[in-house]
Amino acid sequence: MTQREKTWVLFSILYGAFNVIVPFTVLRDVGTLAGAFLFWNLITAAVLLAGAWITSGWKDRGGKEILR
Amino acid sequence: MSPSMIIAGIAAWFTVGSLLSWHARKNLGEGMIEYFLADRKVGGFISAMTYSATTYSAFMMVGLVGLTYSSGIGSLGFEMTYLAATVILMVIFAPRYWAAGRIFRLVTPSELLTRRYGSPMTGAVSAILCLVMLVPYASVQLMGIGYLLEVLSGGAIPFAVGMLIAAGVSFVFSWWAGLRSVALTDALQAVVMIVASLFLMGFIALALFPEGLPEALGSRQDLLKVSWSFPMFLGLTLPWAFFAVTNPQVVQRLYIPASVRNLRRMILGFSAFGFVYTVLCVVFGLAAAVKMPGLEKADNAMAMLLSSVPSPLALVVSLSIMAAAVSTMNSVILTLSSMFGRDVVRTFLPHISEKTELGICRLLIPVITVVCFFFARMQLGLIAVLSSMASGGLLMQLPTILGAFFWKRATAAGAVSSMIAGGLAVGFMYVQGLKPLGHWPPVWGILVSGAVFIAVSLATRPPIDTEDFFSSVESYIRDSFGS
């Protein structure tokens, strides 16, 4: 595993913890869209954006495409 | 909705899909890699769309909408966790599968296990586990279409006829040109799925809730509170969180992008598709709960929602649900046929030619389609049990897969015994309806599978070329990905 991947794994563990702890404790009884609905949308968007950032370091050595 | 309108819609969809399949067939070459992986030369957009359409089945527009309708926002957490976990796993595993596929000319996910563990039995056990778990899963897709068409047509299109139509479409899309036709028709179907959902969202927001959906939800605060218990959340989420590495129909797609750039585009495209589609499906469930509370069967929420929109829109959305089911089913069937040929038949007949092997695999496409059809026709309670345990059963491959890439001490004996022990444990608990200490079978199954994998691996010797496997993959990734 590269250093970048190890950072990604650490980030994922933190995500996993927050993804469960916050909605199941602090936001459990918040009955508005600004509660668990907003939280789960934001934390997922953060992971997806982080995924885009971490894969931006992938180099490309090309390849012929046949289905575009 | 009139049966003739439904039939016309299906005919139009089938015609466009068949034209795409015919176009794909024109350039079809020879061999297993060509037929099942489109020669590993698929562009980023098509890769992303076929990955999305394969992943997201009719469950989203029927099951997830119903789950949100009945249990509220917990379903968003469940589905978003699945999406985030998939992207997390793809970032780590996609380069490894992609590289290993090219180095060892792999066709199926189980074949990677055979190569890594130096044991065809490891791949065969993994393939058989996938066959047992995924045939019911594919059958449920057929059943979903059968029920949908029967309800929409007011009984004019019987359940069995609806399933027959779906099985026929699925067979044509997959058999004609293998992954080339599946990938192109998947892309079409993914576009139909997302566009139809966006149109439905627009209609709901403008016509059904002119006062604003957020304001309307004020009357149903209970839906926005997290009412799920933690064991339920864990039991449902755990197997799906690892879907990206344990379900062969999506893992096989990691072999197909033409380049690193296209592999990355696949991940980004799937991320965007998954996020939008998930939010839309959950909002449909919330909207249905506000507009039409008190349904006896929550799974009817989407059908009821469609009954309050104009017929043309209802038809397009219904076709998108059919597209979701067919795109999942044809991918499952194509992958299973390749696994049966490469990982099971070749294990027992190692000297057959590639041409014979491909012939057997292609023959299996109609065979598996027919098996799924008759399986679904039986409408047994057993199907519900088997399909719900599918993701849990496939999860039992996880220790073996992790060990393949990250634990040099892992052995074939450890892999085989952990998949068998975990599969049996999960199967037994599902059939008996056991939830020890309140936790669902996959939680206990993965503990059993993991413990057996470690214990047996430590007690046996790893294959002699383990180091070669690791160094080849790492070196290829370094050269190709620059990391």
Image (spheres, helix red, strand yellow):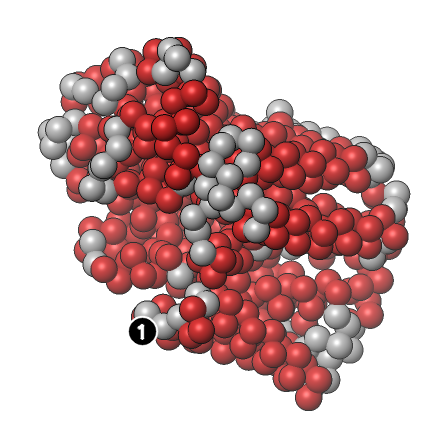
Lateral position of residue B350 relative to residue A63, left or right = left
Please tell me which residue is depicted at 59% across the width and 64% down the height of the picture: B398
Residue B94 at least partly seen = no
Q: Position of residue B139 (x, y in %)?
A: 31, 50
Please tell me which residue is depicted at 77% across the width and 54% down the height of the picture: A10
- Label 1, residues with CA under 10 Å away: few <14, some 14-19, many ≥20: few
Residue at the extreme bottom of the image, as rendered: B459
Badge 1: chain ID? B
* Closest to the observer, A12 or B296: B296
* Closest to the observer, B9 or A53: A53
Determine the image quadrant of residue B296.
top left
Three-letter amino acid code at disc 1?
A: Gln
Residue A44 at least partly seen = yes
Determine the image quadrant of residue A35.
top right
Q: Position of residue B151 (x, y in %)?
A: 18, 32
Q: Which residue is mark 1?
A: B432
Figure quadrant of the N terminus of chain B: top left
Please tell me which residue is depicted at 38% across the width and 11% down the height of the picture: B210
Please tell me which residue is depicted at 57% across the width and 55% down the height of the picture: B242
Q: Position of residue B227 (x, y in %)?
A: 43, 48
Q: Position of residue B142 (x, y in %)?
A: 29, 43
In the image, residue B309 sits, relative to residue B325, either above or below, namely above
Secondary structure type for disc 1: helix
Determine the image quadrant of residue B321.
top left
